C-alpha cells in the first residue's frame, strides 16, 4: 500500500504490536550467568569439570581432553588415583547418583595415550630458567605449566625414577606404571629437563650456579613416622613407605612373614596391607586405634581391602611385639572421639609389623635456607603466592601445610607456576573472582532424565589377591559417553533452548550453536519464567533501576 | 575383566528429553519452539500480563499447526483474553490470518470459514478455532457441540485458565471446586467455588465420537506439539483442551506459570490423554508424583484452604480424591509400576 493519509476507518493499515515496547513494564531483568558448578568449585586441581564433560557429551573427546590439560597434565593418572571429592559434591547425587567424573577422566586420559595426543603447544621461550626440586605430581605439574608458558625448566629428582608418590606410594594395582610413564613422558616432551638420582643439598647455591631465576621445591613427605614398640627382633618391623618404595626399586620383592600386622588407618596403611596380601602373606591384619568412622583412609579403599580378605582390628594400640605375637591394648573413644586406654590387653598372632603412621618432610635441605620458616607440623610455610620466606623459592605438595593427595599436589603445581611466572615478570598473579556456586536449589531438575550411574568393572578376586594387575577397570566408550551425558551442566548454559521456548513474549534471541542466547529487552516483561525453567540455573533475575 | 554395557536406552537432556531443544539432537527431531524460523504466531508487543500461560500456550499450538499445514492456516477467535491482548485496535500481534466475531460463535464462524474454503476448492487451507474456557465451556458451548455434530473440518482449541480472567476473574464452568474467584468468594461455610458435578468438556467432545480429542498442558511442550501435529493430520472435527496458567487469576508469581501447570499434571489434577472416535487411545504419565496440596498451596485462589496456618484437611482430601480418580481412570502411574 502507498503511504497516503488514511481516514480513520477500516481502510487503516494494520499496525503491528511490535510498536508496543512492553519492555517498559519490566521491574526485573533476566541476566544470563555462569555459575561455578560444585565439582569445579571443589576440585583441588582447579579442573573445569563441567566444561570438559560438555565436550565429551558430544563425543568430541580431543577437545574435552585439551580442556582437562589446561589444568591437569595427567588425566589418566588422576582418573585413577584422585580421590574425586568432586563426586562427593555433585548435584546429581541428589537425584540418583553422582556423575562418575573420575571414570570419564580416565577414559579420556587412556584414549589420549592410545592416540598419542600431545600437550597443546606452549608459548615462545621467555629466556627464564626455573629449577624444580622433586619429580612428584606437584613438581611435574609445575614444570608442565611453566614449560607451556615458555620458561626453561629443569627438574632435579633424588630418586631413580620420576613420579614421586605416584610411583613410590601408590601401588601398581591402582596405577599401572605404563600409564604413569606415558604421562610423565608427555610432560618431558615439552622440553623439560629431568635429572634423576640427584639429591640437592643447597637450593640457593644451585639456583645461583645454575642461573635459575626461581625454584619450586616439591620434595614430598617421605620419612615414615616411627613409634617405639619393644621387640626382640627389630628387623621384622618395617615401615609402609619403605615397603612400597622397595616394590618399585628392589630387584626382589621384600620378604614378609606369614602373618603381617599393619599399624595405622590411613590410605598408606590400606596400600601396605593390600600389597602384603599380594606378596603372599597368609593373614594381613590392620590395627587401628579408633573406629572406621574416624579412619582417615577413603571409604572405597577400606572396602576394597576388606573385600580382598584384609582384617581390621578397631580400637587397639600395639604395646609389644614378641616372637610370633603382639600384645595390644583395647581402646575406648571418649566423648570427643579420641581413643583412651582401657587397661585391657589381648594377644594377636603375627610375625611382621608394618608401620603406617604417617610421614614427615625431610627438612634437612630447607631449614637452613635464610628466611624459610617451618611450621610446628614440620612442614614448610608458604605465603598466599606459594612462596617461602626466601625470595624466588616456592614450595608445594606434601611438604607444605595442606591435605596430602596427588590432586592437591597437582593443584599446587599449577598455582605455583602462575605465581612463579608473575614473579619472573615482576608482577603479582591475581586470581579471577569466582562466580557464585550453582547449588542444587538453583536447578530445575524436572528436565533431566533419570539415569543411574555406571559401575566400573573390577578384577576377579583371585587375581586381586595374588597379582598386581589393576583392580578397577575403565569404562568403554559407550559407557563413558553415557556417564558424561549424566552431567547436569550446573550453572552453565548447555543450549537446551528452554528459555527460547518458554518466553511468552518471544524476547529471547537464539544466537546459534555455541553462541547461546540474549534477551530482547524491548519486549521482555521480566516475568521470570525463563529463570524458573532453566534446568541448570544459568539465568538470574536482577531488579531494574526504576 | 567382565565387560559391562549400559545400553543407551535412556534419553538424556541432550537426546530426546524434556527440554525444548538441545544442541546434540538431530534438527528434524527438534521441537518447533526450538527453531529460529518458527512463526511466532503471536508476536512480541502483545499486552498479555507478565508470565501469561495463555499467550504461551496459543503460540505453542499455532506455531506447531503452521508447520503441520505448511502455513496454510486461518484462525478464528472467540472473545476473551487471547483476543483482547493481541488486538487492541489498530495493532495486532497475529502473524497468521485471524478473525474474531463474537464471544459465543467461534466454532460456528470457523465451520463457515472451512466451508468457504471447501467451496473455493482450497481444501489445503486449514482452520483452527480457539477460545478460553468461558468462550468454550459456557458461552460457545452450543456452537461447539454443533460443529462436532456436523464433523466440520476444524480443530477447536480451548485454552483453559479456569475462569473469566479477562473481565476480572469470574467463575466459569471450568473453575475447579474450592477456587476463589470474584463471584465465588472465600467466605461462608464452603468458601470458593462449589464442588458440584463438574463439566468436563473433553469428555463431552468424546461423546460426539469425533475423530480426535486430546488434553495438553503448557508445561509439556513436546506432548502439546505432538498432539497439534497429529490433530492437523486428521480431517473432521477435532478438539484440543490446553491447560494454561493465569498468574493474575491464580494468584501465583509470573515466574511460576509453567511450574504451576506442571504441578497440575504431576498431582493428577489435570490428566493428559488422547482419544479417537470416543475411545481413549493414549494417556500421559506422571513422572514425579506430588500430593494435590503441592499444587494448591502456592496459589492465592486456594489460600483459604491454608488460612492462619490451619489446613482445611477435608476439602484438600476431596480434591485429592479427584486427582486419585484421574490417576486411576487414566492409569497415570501405569499401575504404580515403572513409568517410562
Image (spheres, coloured by chain):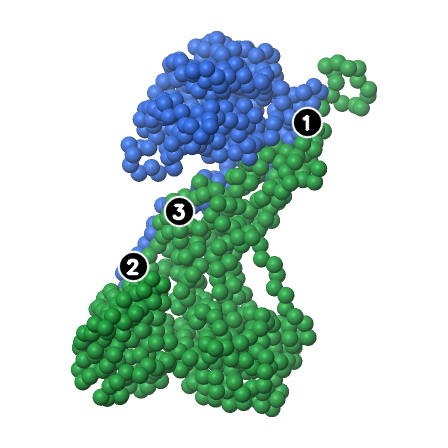
Q: Which mark is residue A17?
A: 1
Q: CA distance from mark 2 to mark 1?
A: 61 Å
In the rendered image of the structure, the colour used to display chain B is blue
Q: Are marks 3 and 2 on the same chain?
A: no
Q: Quadrant of the C terminus of chain A?
A: top right
Return the disc, 3 or 1, that comes first in the chain's sequence: 1
Q: Secondary structure at mark 2?
A: loop
Q: Are marks 2 and 1 on the same chain?
A: no
Q: Which mark is residue B3?
A: 2
Does the residue at mark 3 contact the one at mark 1 (Cβ under 8 Å)? Answer: no
Chain under label 2?
Answer: B
Position in image of residue A274 (x %, y %) = 28, 72
Chain under label 3?
Answer: A
| Horizontal relation, residue A238 to residue A509: left or right | left
Q: Secondary structure at mark 3?
A: loop
Q: CA distance from mark 3 to mark 2?
A: 26 Å
* Of labels 2 and 1, the one closer to you: 1
Residue at 48% x, 60% y is A42
Does the residue at mark 2 contact the one at mark 1 (Cβ under 8 Å)? Answer: no
Q: Is residue B110 visible?
A: no
Q: Quadrant of the N terminus of chain A?
A: top right
Q: Return the residue nearer the eye: A129 or A117.
A: A129
Q: Residues within 10 Å of mark 2 (few under 14, many from 20)?
A: few
Q: Quadrant of residue A383?
A: bottom right
* Of labels 3 and 2, the one closer to you: 3
Does the residue at mark 3 contact the one at mark 2 (Cβ under 8 Å)? Answer: no
Q: Quadrant of residue A467?
A: bottom left
Residue at 51% x, 82% y is A133
Q: Residues within 10 Å of mark 1 (few under 14, many from 20)?
A: many
The residue carrying mark 3 is A95
Amino acid at each position: 500500500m502507498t503511504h497516503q493519509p488514511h481516514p480513520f476507518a477500516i481502510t487503516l493499515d494494520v499496525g503491528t504490536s511490535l510498536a508496543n515496547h512492553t519492555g517498559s513494564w519490566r521491574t526485573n531483568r533476566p541476566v544470563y550467568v555462569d555459575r561455578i558448578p560444585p565439582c569445579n568449585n571443589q576440585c583441588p586441581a582447579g579442573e573445569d569439570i563441567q566444561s570438559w564433560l560438555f565436550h565429551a557429551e558430544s563425543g568430541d573427546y580431543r577437545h574435552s581432553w585439551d580442556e582437562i590439560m589446561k589444568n591437569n597434565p595427567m588425566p589418566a593418572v588422576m582418573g585413577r588415583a584422585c580421590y574425586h571429592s568432586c563426586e562427593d559434591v555433585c548435584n546429581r547425587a541428589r537425584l540418583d547418583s553422582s556423575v562418575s567424573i573420575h571414570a570419564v577422566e580416565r577414559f579420556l586420559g587412556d584414549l589420549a595415550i592410545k592416540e598419542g595426543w600431545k600437550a597443546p603447544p606452549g608459548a615462545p621461550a621467555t629466556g627464564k630458567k626455573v629449577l624444580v626440586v622433586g619429580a612428584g605430581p606437584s613438581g611435574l605439574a609445575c614444570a608442565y605449566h611453566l614449560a607451556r608458558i615458555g620458561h626453561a625448566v629443569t627438574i632435579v629428582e633424588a630418586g631413580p625414577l620420576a613420579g614421586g608418590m605416584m610411583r613410590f606410594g601408590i601401588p601398581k594395582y591402582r596405577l599401572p606404571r605404563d600409564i604413569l610413564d606415558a604421562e610423565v613422558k608427555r610432560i618431558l616432551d615439552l622440553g623439560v629437563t629431568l635429572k634423576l638420582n640427584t639429591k640437592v643439598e643447597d637450593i640457593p647455591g644451585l639456583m645461583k650456579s645454575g642461573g635459575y631465576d626461581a625454584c619450586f621445591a616439591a620434595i614430598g613427605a617421605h620419612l615414615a613416622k616411627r613409634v617405639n614398640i619393644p621387640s626382640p627382633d627389630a628387623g621384622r618391623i618395617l615401615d609402609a613407605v619403605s615397603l612400597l618404595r622397595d616394590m618399585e626399586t628392589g630387584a626382589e620383592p621384600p620378604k614378609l612373614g606369614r602373618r603381617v600386622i599393619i599399624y595405622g588407618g590411613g590410605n598408606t596403611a590400606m596400600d601396605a596391607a593390600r600389597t602384603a596380601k599380594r606378596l603372599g602373606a597368609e593373614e594381613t591384619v590392620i590395627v587401628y586405634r579408633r573406629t572406621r568412622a574416624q579412619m582417615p583412609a577413603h571409604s572405597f579403599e577400606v572396602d576394597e581391602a576388606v573385600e580382598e580378605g584384609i582384617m581390621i582390628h578397631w580400637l587397639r594400640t600395639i604395646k609389644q611385639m614378641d616372637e610370633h605375637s603382639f600384645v595390644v591394648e583395647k581402646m575406648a573413644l571418649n566423648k570427643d572421639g579420641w581413643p583412651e586406654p582401657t587397661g585391657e590387653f589381648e594377644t594377636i598372632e603375627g610375625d611382621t609389623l608394618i608401620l603406617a603412621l604417617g610421614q614427615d618432610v625431610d627438612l634437612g635441605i630447607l631449614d637452613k635456607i635464610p628466611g624459610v620458616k617451618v611450621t610446628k607440623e614440620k612442614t614448610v610455610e608458604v605465603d598466599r603466592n606459594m612462596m617461602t620466606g626466601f625470595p624466588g623459592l616456592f614450595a608445594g605438595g606434601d611438604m607444605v601445610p595442606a591435605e596430602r593427595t596427588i590432586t592437591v599436589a597437582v593443584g599446587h603445581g599449577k598455582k605455583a607456576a602462575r605465581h612463579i611466572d608473575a614473579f619472573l615478570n615482576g608482577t603479582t598473579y591475581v586470581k579471577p573472582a569466582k562466580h557464585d556456586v550453582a547449588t542444587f536449589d538453583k536447578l530445575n531438575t524436572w528436565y533431566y532424565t533419570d539415569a543411574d550411574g555406571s559401575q566400573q568393572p573390577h578384577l576377579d578376586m583371585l587375581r586381586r589377591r595374588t597379582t598386581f594387575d589393576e583392580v578397577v577397570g575403565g569404562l568403554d566408550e559407550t559407557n563413558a559417553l553415557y556417564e558424561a551425558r549424566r552431567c547436569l551442566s550446573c550453572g552453565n548454559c548447555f543450549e537446551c533452548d528452554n528459555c527460547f521456548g518458554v518466553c511468552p513474549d518471544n524476547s529471547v534471541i537464539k544466537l546459534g550453536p555455541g553462541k547461546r542466547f540474549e534477551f530482547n529487552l524491548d519486549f521482555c516483561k521480566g516475568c521470570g519464567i525463563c529463570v524458573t525453567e532453566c534446568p541448570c540455573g544459568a539465568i538470574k533475575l536482577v531488579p531494574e533501576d526504576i | 575383566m567382565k565387560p559391562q554395557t549400559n545400553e543407551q536406552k535412556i534419553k538424556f537432556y541432550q537426546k530426546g528429553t524434556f527440554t525444548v531443544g538441545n544442541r546434540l539432537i538431530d534438527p528434524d527431531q527438534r521441537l518447533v519452539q526450538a527453531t529460529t524460523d518458527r512463526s511466532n504466531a503471536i508476536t512480541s508487543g502483545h499486552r498479555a500480563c507478565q508470565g501469561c500461560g495463555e499467550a504461551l500456550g496459543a503460540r505453542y499450538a499455532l506455531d506447531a499447526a503452521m508447520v503441520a499445514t505448511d502455513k496454510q492456516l486461518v484462525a478464528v477467535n472467540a472473545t476473551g483474553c487471547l483476543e483482547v491482548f493481541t488486538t487492541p485496535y489498530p495493532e495486532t500481534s497475529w502473524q497468521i490470518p485471524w478473525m474474531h466475531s463474537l464471544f459465543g460463535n467461534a466454532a460456528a464462524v470457523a465451520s463457515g470459514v472451512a466451508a468457504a474454503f471447501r467451496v473455493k476448492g482450497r481444501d489445503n487451507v486449514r482452520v483452527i478455532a480457539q477460545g478460553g474456557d468461558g468462550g468454550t465451556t459456557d458461552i460457545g458451548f452450543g456452537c461447539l457441540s454443533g460443529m462436532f455434530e456436523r464433523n466440520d473440518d476444524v480443530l477447536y482449541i480451548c485454552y483453559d485458565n479456569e475462569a473469566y480472567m479477562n473481565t476480572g476473574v469470574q467463575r466459569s464452568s471450568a473453575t475447579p471446586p474450592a477456587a476463589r474467584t470474584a463471584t465465588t468468594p472465600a467466605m461462608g461455610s464452603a468458601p470458593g467455588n462449589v464442588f458440584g458435578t463438574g463439566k468436563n468438556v473433553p469428555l463431552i467432545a468424546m461423546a460426539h465420537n469425533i475423530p480426535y480429542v486430546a488434553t495438553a498442558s503448557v508445561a509439556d511442550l513436546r506432548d502439546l506439539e505432538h498432539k497439534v501435529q497429529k490433530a492437523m493430520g486428521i480431517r473432521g472435527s477435532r478438539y484440543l483442551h490446553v491447560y494454561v496458567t493465569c498468574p493474575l487469576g491464580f494468584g501465583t508469581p509470573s515466574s511460576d506459570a509453567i511450574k504451576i501447570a506442571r504441578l497440575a499434571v504431576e498431582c493428577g489434577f489435570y490428566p493428559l490423554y488422547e482419544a479417537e472416535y470416543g475411545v481413549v487411545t493414549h494417556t500421559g504419565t506422571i513422572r514425579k508424583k506430588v500430593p494435590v496440596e503441592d499444587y494448591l498451596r502456592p496459589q492465592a485462589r486456594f489460600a483459604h484452604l491454608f488460612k492462619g496456618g490451619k489446613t482445611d484437611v477435608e476439602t484438600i482430601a476431596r480434591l485429592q480424591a479427584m486427582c486419585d480418580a484421574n490417576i486411576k481412570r487414566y492409569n497415570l502411574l501405569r499401575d504404580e509400576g515403572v513409568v517410562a
